[in-house]
Image (cartoon, rainbow, N blue to C red):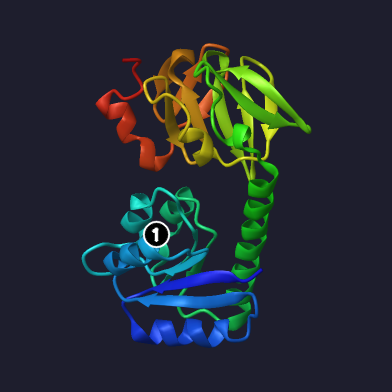
């Protein structure tokens, strides 16, 4: 299946290079080109996009802030002339980070990586039933698909969620269920007054927090979880406190 692609870059030459490379990769299909991230928002509201080739330093809205505005994110490959944004980009779960000028072999490697993630997303979406995506009528429970079974889990007993590639570990005090889901899909279901995203790879149930030291959250069961760079402000504004 082809991936529908959007180029978002304020440099015309960057568009030319990406288009030339895409012409030799049969599973990439160009459906739009934007020179501002603000223009891309309009495209995403009107078209289905699977993959964005995204520059970072652009007028009005930079690429990373653009990613943060998206609720349903396509896959993203960053194409930037500045290597200093790589760590922050990967914390936002981009597929790859291409440093300009990049050669075709490096571009192809990034495209193959995106295709792998795209196929896994499609596979996971096709295997999840309606009840697996949404909570059941009792909001105190959710269904979790694990080992070909649907397990009914009490939300209040979930300690934290841990992203593991295209899977998520759902931890209680000491054990976990492994499920083919994304962390973001769980984030949309969980009560915001009890659960909070503290890292690109972790969502935490606030009631299990014992104490916070530096950029580490110590849990009552003795485990330690990191606080991601983009989530440190949570420690400063008190969002980890149970309201």
In the image, residue 191 above or below residue 34: above
Residue 44 in which image quadrant: bottom left
In the image, residue 12 above or below residue 81: below
In this rendering, position of residue 117 left or right of residue 59: right
Location of residue 114 in the rendering, given as x and y in whole percent from the top left corner: 60, 63
Location of residue 12 in the rendering, given as x and y in whole percent from the top left corner: 35, 85
The 10 Å Cα crowd at callout 1, few under 14, some 14 to 19, many 20 or more, is some
In the image, residue 197 above or below residue 242: below
Q: In which quadrant of the rendered image does the C terminus lie?
A: top left
Picture residue at 56% right of the left edge, 24% below the top: 136
Residue 182 in which image quadrant: top right
Picture residue at 63% right of the left edge, 57% below the top: 117
- Helix, strand or loop status at disc 1: helix
Q: In which quadrant of the rendered image does the N terminus lie?
A: bottom right
- Front position in the image: 206 or 225: 206
In this rendering, position of residue 151 left or right of residue 218: right
- Front position in the image: 186 or 166: 186
Which residue carries the number 1 mark? 85
Q: Is residue 201 visible?
A: no
Residue 230 in which image quadrant: top left
Location of residue 29 in the rendering, given as x and y in whole percent from the top left corner: 55, 77
Count of residue discs: 1
From this viewpoint, which residue is outermost toward the left? Answer: 60
Q: Is residue 90 visible?
A: yes
Picture residue at 45% right of the left edge, 13% below the top: 207
Location of residue 180 in the rendering, given as x and y in whole percent from the top left corner: 67, 40
From this viewpoint, which residue is outermost toward the right? Answer: 148
- Front position in the image: 96 or 243: 243
């Amino acid at each position: 299946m082809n991936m529908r692609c959007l180029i978002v870059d304020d440099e015309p030459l960057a568009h030319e290079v990406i288009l030339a490379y895409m012409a030799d990769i049969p599973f990439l299909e160009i459906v739009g080109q934007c020179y501002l991230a603000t223009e891309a928002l309009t495209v995403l509201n009107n078209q289905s996009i699977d993959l964005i080739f995204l520059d970072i330093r652009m007028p009005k809205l930079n690429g990373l802030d653009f990613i943060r505005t998206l609720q349903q994110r396509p896959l993203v490959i960053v194409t930037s002339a500045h290597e200093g944004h790589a760590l922050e980009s990967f914390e936002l779960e981009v597929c790859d980070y291409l440093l300009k000028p990049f050669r075709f072999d490096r571009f192809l490697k990034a495209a193959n990586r995106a295709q792998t993630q795209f196929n896994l997303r499609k596979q996971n979406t096709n295997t999840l039933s309606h009840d697996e995506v949404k909570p059941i009528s009792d909001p105190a429970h959710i269904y979790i698909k694990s080992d070909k079974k649907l397990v009914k889990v009490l939300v209040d007993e979930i300690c934290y969620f841990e992203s593991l590639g295209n899977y998520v570990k759902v931890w209680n005090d000491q054990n976990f269920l492994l499920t083919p889901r994304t962390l973001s899909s769980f984030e949309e279901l969980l009560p915001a007054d009890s659960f909070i995203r503290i890292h690109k790879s972790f969502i935490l149930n606030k009631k299990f927090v014992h104490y916070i030291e530096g950029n580490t959250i110590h849990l009552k069961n003795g485990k330690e979880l990191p606080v991601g760079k983009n989530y440190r402000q949570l420690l400063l504004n008190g969002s980890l406190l149970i309201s």
